[in-house]
Amino acid sequence: MIKEVISASEDKMKKSIEVLSKELQGLKAGRANPSMLDRVVVDYYGTPTPISGLASVSTPEARMIVIQPWDKSAMKEIEKAIQKSDLGLNPTNDGQVIRLLVPELTEETRKNLVKVVKKNGEDAKVAIRSIRRDANDKLKALKKEGASEDEVKSAEEVIQKKTDSFVKEIDRLVDAKEKEILTV
């Protein structure tokens, strides 16, 4: 049972890191990145579909994303979805492809993005600590059910070490994204 608690908490912590990583990829850092469109969902014949499921997405230049729909009738819907999104990008359509120009970030925008990155990092740390607390509560319950005190204590130490390593990983991801945003 103790190993199951440790394993389950580690899996949850890994998922928290994955969520943070995806959130950070979605933030625009002044450079065009196809993953910016991952959160944009298009209403395609009544079915919410990600853009990557409707078109090929590429970045031919540092500040441009080109979307080439496989079904030309989906162009208007893709444009609408991009305009409704929180990306702040205006699509241009030439009948064949949709182009998105990623504007140069102002100093103020960069600072605001860094705040968002740090907040996302803090939220991820809170999630990791919450997982640790839940695991420790389960271990205490196991101790009451008859698990040895030494086993529980060593399991708590293992969970604490995992928590520390995942918090370091969060800091590394946040620092890397912050550098990317602040690099002009």
Image (spheres, grey):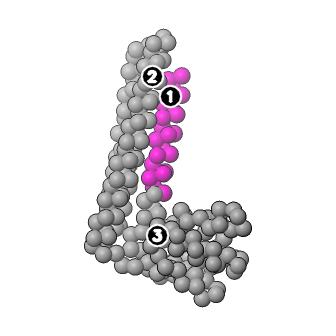
Q: Amino acid at mark 2?
A: Leu
Residue 165 as seen in the image, left or right of residue 68: left
Q: Which residues are magenta?
A: 1-22
Which of disc 2 and disc 3 is earlier in sequence? 3
- Give the camera-side residue of 91 and 127: 91
Query: Does residue 99 belong to the magenta stretch?
Result: no
Residue at image position (47%, 76%) is 89
Percent of width and height locating residue 9: 48, 34
- The furthest residue to the bottom: 94
Query: Does residue 18 belong to the magenta stretch?
Result: yes
Report if the CB atoms under discs 2 and 1 are less than 8 Å apart: yes
Label of residue 87 in the image: 3
Quarter of the image with the N terminus is: top right
The residue beneath circle 1 is 5
User: Vertically, is 172 above or below 98?
Assistant: above
SS under mark 3:
loop
Residue at image position (65%, 62%) is 48
Crowd band around label 3 with a 10 angstrom C-alpha radius: few (<14), some (14–19), many (20+):
some
Crowd band around label 1 with a 10 angstrom C-alpha radius: few (<14), some (14–19), many (20+):
some
Give the distance between the C-alpha atoms of the residues marked 3 and 1, in whole angstroms: 39 Å
SS under mark 1:
helix
Residue 5 as seen in the image, left or right of residue 49: left
Which of disc 1 and disc 2 is earlier in sequence? 1
Percent of width and height locating residue 177: 36, 61
The residue beneath circle 2 is 139
Percent of width and height locating residue 66: 55, 79
Q: Amino acid at mark 1?
A: Val
Give the distance between the C-alpha atoms of the residues marked 2 and 1, in whole angstroms: 7 Å
